Amino acid sequence: MKITLDRKDIESEIIGRLERISGEEFKKCYQCGNCSAGCPVSYEMEVQPTQVMRLLQLGRVEELQKANSMWVCVGCLQCYSRCPKGVSVANTLEALRQVNLRHGEGRIEIKEVGLPFLKTAPQQAIVAGFRKLVG
Ligand code: SF4
Ligand code: SF4
């Protein structure tokens, strides 16, 4: 018998996987907004840290996968340190990156990074970029 999964099944499967990888329980977030207020790069994010948690609670994972937030996050943990519920948006975005990279989306090959960029970019930026984008 062929089992077909509808979109809702697929979304809840992905969300379950994201919870397992991140170790976070998305429903714990009560939308206070502290994470977005403290995030140093939220102004560059298409979906703010608070909204990341809300979209996951609503099962709207596809919108998150299209947004730049997971790539913009610098992993500073400010969101986690400010969260009264002990939720880490940082871990959540890391899990999203991992799932995307496993599918080959947003992934880069080191050899594709141009030498002029490598010569001028700060070392820290290169290491952080490789950690986030190479998978
Ligand atoms: S870890 Fe990411 S989401 Fe959290 S405050 Fe830092 S940059 Fe923002
Ligand atoms: S600080 Fe915590 S509880 Fe508040 S919106 Fe962010 S993740 Fe949710």
Image (cartoon, rainbow, N blue to C red):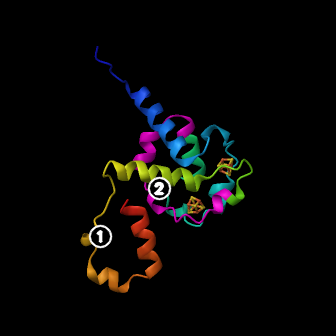
Depth check: 57 or 42 in front?
57
Which residue, as the protein is rendered here, is positioned at the far right? 84
Residue interval drawn in magenta: 56-80
Mark 2 residue type: Met
Q: Residues within 10 Å of mark 2 (few under 14, many from 20)?
A: many
Report x, y in % for residue 51. 57, 47
Left or right: 129 as drawn, with respect to 48: left
Numbered mark located on residue 110 in the image: 1
- Asked if the stretch drawn in magenta spans residue 63, the answer is yes
- Above or below 106: residue 51: above
Report x, y in % for residue 49. 57, 53
Q: Label 2's element? A: helix
Which quadrant of the view contains residue 27? top right
Q: Label 1's element? A: helix
**Of tags 2 and 1, which is closer to the observer?**
1
Residue found 60% across the figure and 45% down from its top: 24
Left or right: 120 as drawn, with respect to 124: left
Depth check: 50 or 89 in front?
89
Q: From the image, which quarter does the N terminus lie in?
A: top left
The residue at label 2 has a CB less than 8 Å from ligand 1: no
Numbered mark located on residue 70 in the image: 2
Mark 1 residue type: Ile
